[in-house]
Amino acid sequence: FQYHQFQVVGRGLPTETDEQPKIYRMKLWATNEVRAKSKFWYYLRKLKKVKKSNGQMLAINEIFEKNPTTIKNYGIWLRYQSRTGYHNMYKEYRDTTLNGAIEQMYTEMASRHRVRHHCIQVIKTATIPAKLCKRESTKQFHNSKIKFPLVFKKVRPPTRKLKTTYKASRPNLFV
Amino acid sequence: MPFKRYVEIGRIALVNYGKDYGKLVVIVDVIDQNRALVDAPDMVRGQMNFKRLTLTDIKIDIKRVPNKKTLIAAMEAADVKNKWENSSWGRKLIVQKKRASLNDFDRFKVMLAKIKKAGVVRQELAKLKKETA
């Protein structure tokens, strides 16, 4: 996966007027720790009067998925900037891990709405029980007797080394 | 042409790309249109793209996402291993693997056996030719 979830904890530096400044904790998604810290200061600047130059990072830990072997329905609330303004959105994804769902979200926003990574802010994420899912495209997989054929099956070479540009005969795509 | 092999819970599939190439896995749940949750007795349950799987004719009777013990019991009950090794597809794969693992002495033995077999066939053919001539 590309996106990792980090818990970043930081506070403003203690001054004479404020001996014990409030500590703030954020959970965010970034590709690495450096980016996570940068994102933390970005959000914190918008919420409180503190910058990286007069603040300190207390802790940064990566958060891992507790049950990566079960399928969950993730609901993601986001705020993104389009060419004409800011909008809110709610999207649903079916995945085994939250990081996978976030990655799906970023790629889908890029493809469907041409929104790049830096224009997206994740407001909230949640695992949604099957009853409360809103989107048909996730609800159609809530079937314990799901059954469908794979209609278009291209046979791939098992390693990229065996790939050829030309083939002797037309490949058979049925199953 | 109707479809005979469906993606369903309990379908056995062969992995045809990637790290687990050549393994038989059970489709334990469907994540979305392109991915399935697969499980095998010797691997951790994980997701796999359908593009990496080829469906087989074998299907076992399990509920959605069984735990490892139930899965292994169901696989024993359906006798997946024997069914696979006796099917023509399974036998072909075993022969391919054997051929790839021969050493030079084994290949020499195979050559002698082929020559012998061809000699016997040619004798029979000569006999039949003599009868018709």
Image: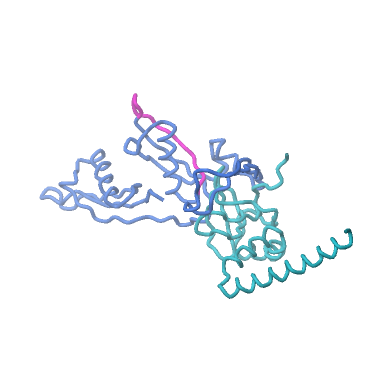
Chain colours: A blue, B cyan
Magenta stretch holds residue A84: yes
Quadrant placement of the N terminus of chain B:
top right
**Would you say the magenta stretch is mainly helix, strand or loop?**
strand
Identify the residue at the far front of this view: B133
Report the span colored magenta: A82-95
Q: Nearer the viewer, residue A38 or B93?
A: B93
Identify the residue at the far top of this view: A84
Q: Quadrant of residue B33?
A: top right
- Residue at position x 60%, y 39% in the image: A140
Q: Nearer the viewer, residue B65 or B13?
A: B13
Identify the residue at the far left of this view: A16
Residue A157, placed above or below residue B80? above
Residue B85, placed above or below residue A32? below
Q: Position of residue B2 (x, y in %)?
A: 73, 40
Q: Position of residue A115 (x, y in %)?
A: 37, 33
Residue B15 is at least partly visible in this image: yes
